[in-house]
Image (tube, coloured by chain):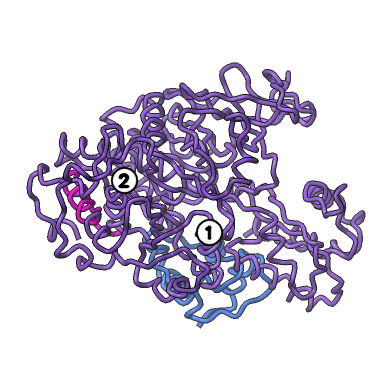
Amino acid sequence: MISDELKTVILSALKLDDWEFTDSTVAAEVPGWDSLSHMNVVVAVEKHFGLRFRSAEVLRLMNVGDLQRLVNAKLAKPQ
Amino acid sequence: MGTDVYSNDGIEQINMSDIRFSEDTIWHRWCENAEKSPDSVAIVHWKAGETPFCWTWGELMRTAQLYSAALTSRGINRGDVCAIIARHNCLLYPVYMGCVCAGAIPAILAYQNPRLHPDKFREGLEGMGKRSGLDWILTERALEGVLQPLLGTGRSTIKGLQFPFENNDYVEGVETQVPNGTVPTIRDSDPLLLQHSSGTTGLQKPVLLSHHAVLDHVTQYAKFLAVSKADKIVSWLPLYHDMGLIAAFHMPLALGIPTIQIDPFEWVLAPSLLLEAMSLERATMTWLPNFAFSMMADKIHEEDLDGVALDSCRMIISCSEPVRSRDQEKFFRRFAPRGFKREALSSCYAMAETTFAVTQTPPGREPATLTIDPQELAKGRAIPVAAPGVGKVCVSSGELIPACRIRIVDGDFNDVGEGRVGEVLIKTPWMFDGYRNYPEKTAAAILDGWYLSGDYGFQCGSEFYIIGRKKDVVIVAGNNIYPEDVEAALNDLNGVIPGRVVAFGEEDVELGSERISVVVETPLTDESQRRQLRMAIVKAGMGIDVSITDVYLVQPRFLVKSSAGKPSRTANKERVLRMKESSMTLQPEGIQDDLRRVKNSDSECAEA
C-alpha cells in the first residue's frame, strides 16, 4: 500500500494535483512521469525521507510498490 | 548468442553474401578491420549488473555475415529499407551490420515508449513509412501484436515483420554464399543507412546517407579529433539519434577502435553508469547533450562512484542542444577530484543532414566562450561586454572541420560578416542528397547546394557560436519537439477553445535543457473542471510522447495573435514569462491561479 506521505511527494515532484497510486502503478501510467522526471521523483523522495538510494536500487524499481518497499526498508535501517 | 553458436573459424571464412562491395565502402572497411585484428574488441555491450558482452571483430563480422544470409533467405533484397526496432540488445549490432552486408538499408528507430498508445506508435510508423519507404521491420516478438496491424492494410509499405533478436533459430541452417562474377557491386555512392531528423509523430524527415558520406565524414572528423588506436568511445546514446549512430557507433567501427554501448534507458535512471563504464574500460571519449552534463553533476551520489577515475577521458563533447557554460563548469567542478581534466570539456555542432559534425572544439582545450551584451544580441550584433558578469555567456561550438563550410546570412541570404547574427548555412562533401521521398522539404532545406540549417549563430575569429533556432522547435534533452504537434494534440480536448493553444520551450536551469509549456484558452472557470482539463492536457501530451511540464490556463482572448492571425508563440511566450517574473497583482484574470500554482510548485521543489 502506498502511503499518503509518499504519494504527496511524488505528486509534488510531478506537479500533479492528484493521482491514484497502487502498488502496481508504473511510471508510464502517470502523467508527466517520464524518464527525465523519474530522477526528480527519486531525488524528491530521498530528500523528503532523508534517504540515499544507490543506482542499482533505482534500476530495480519496477513500480511504485517497489519504491514504497525500498523507502520502508531504508527507514527501518539506520542510514 | 555469440560464441556458443557461431564457429570460431578463421577470418578467411568471411564471405560477402551474394553482393560485392567496392573498396571504399563501410562494409569493406569493417572487413579490413576484422582481417587485421580478428581478436580485438569491436563493441562492448554494457548492461548494468551484468558482465559486459564483448564482440571481437572476428566474431562480430561472422555473425553479421550469418544475419546477412538469413535476411536474404527471408526475402530481404538489396535496397530494401529495414527498420530496426529493438531494446538494448547485443544482437542489434550484427543485425544492423548484416543489413549492410545484404545491401539493404538499415534504419534504427526508437522502441515503443510504454507511455505511447499503440495506435499512435503505429500511426507514427505508418507516417514515417510513407516517406522512408520502410520495407521490413526487424524487431522483437514483444512488439508483434502492436506492429502486426500495419501489414496488409494497403496504407503501409511494410512487407513484413522479422524477429532476428529472439534466439538462434533465425540464423540456424543458413549458409553464407561466395560471391560470383555476375553479382552487383555496391559502390561508395550507394545508400548505406537511413536516419531520421528528430521530430514528433510521423513527421520525421528521412535522411539517406551513402557509404561515401559516412566513411569520409567519420575519417575527416576523427582526424580533426586526433583519434588514435589508443582511443575508446563510450556512449549511452540511442542509435536512432545521429550523435549515437555516427559519432559513437560508425566512427569507432570504421576506425577499428572499441565502442562501449550502454543502455539509454538504464543510463537515464542511473547516470553514474556512464562514468563507471568510462572508468572501468579506460574510455577516452564520449558525446552528450547538454542536459546530461547537468544531470550527472547534480544527481549522482558519491556512493555510486566508488573507485571511479576519469583521468582517461580526453574529450567529453557537448552536442545536440545549446551548450550551456554553467553546466560544463558544474560538471568539471564535480568530477575534477576524480581526475577529470578541464581540457576534456568540448563541444560540437552537428546534424543528421550533414551526416554529423560541422564544427568541433579542437582537442586539448575547452570550448571558447564570449560574454555578449544581450541588448546588442537582440539587435543581431555579438558585441562582447566590457565588464564581465553582466552579459550573456555564449559557448562556442568550435571550429570548422576541414572541408566543411559555413555562411552566416541575413533574410536575403547575404553574408552578414563576423560578429553579426544570421542563419547558418552549411556545405560539406558529405551532405545528404535530400529527404527521401520528400521533394518539397528538400527544396525548402537546400539552396544552391547549401543546407539551410534553421539555426541562428555568429562567427568570431575561427569559432562558431550557435545561439538559437529560426523555427520554434524546442529541444528537450537532445530531442526536437515541434510545438505544432503539441498544439494539434490539445486542440480537440473538451474545454479547450480550438486553435487557441500555444506551445513553447521554457528554459529549465535545473535540467540543463528546455521543458514544454502550453498556454491554453478555456472558458472553464470552475476549479475542479480546470484541474481535470490540466490533467487531460498532460495526458494528451503523453499520447504523442511529449511531457508537458507547465500548463497555463487562460481566459478567452488572452493569446496575442501574429500578423497571420494565429496565436504567436514568441509573443505569448514572452508575455507569460514576463508575467511569471512580475508582480502577481498586475496579472490579468485567468492566468493568476496557474501562475501562482507554478510559483508554488517551484518553491516547493526548492524547499524539498
In the image, B385 versus B429, the foreground residue is B429
Secondary structure beneath dot 2 equals strand
Residue B585 x, y percent position in the rendering: 91, 56
Horizontal arrangement in the rendering, residue B388 relative to residue B219 (left or right):
right
- Which disc, if any, is residue B94? none
Horizontal arrangement in the rendering, residue B400 relative to residue B181 (left or right):
right
**At 53% from the left edge and 55% from the top edge, which residue is drawn?**
B131
> Circle 2: is it few (<14), some (14-19), or many (20+) Cα within 10 Å?
many
Residue B325 x, y percent position in the rendering: 59, 34
Tell me, yes or no, if residue B419 can be seen here. Answer: yes
What are the residue bounds of the magenta stretch? B49-67
- Is residue B5 inside the magenta stretch? no
Q: Colour of chain B?
A: purple
Would you place residue B192 above or below residue B431 in this image? below
Q: Are marks 1 and 2 on the same chain?
A: yes
Lower position in the chain sequence, tag 1 or tag 2? 1
For label 2, the residue is: B260
> Circle 1: is it few (<14), some (14-19), or many (20+) Cα within 10 Å?
some
Q: Colour of chain A?
A: blue
Tell me, yes or no, if residue B45 can be seen here. Answer: no
- Is residue B57 inside the magenta stretch? yes
Residue B30 x, y percent position in the rendering: 25, 39
Secondary structure beneath dot 1 equals helix
Q: Amino acid at mark 1?
A: Lys
For label 1, the residue is: B130
Residue B12 x, y percent position in the rendering: 10, 42
Give the letter of the chain under mark 1.
B
Q: CA distance from mark 1 to mark 2?
A: 34 Å
Quarter holding the C terminus of chain B is: bottom right
**At 71% from the left edge and 21% from the top edge, which residue is drawn?**
B416
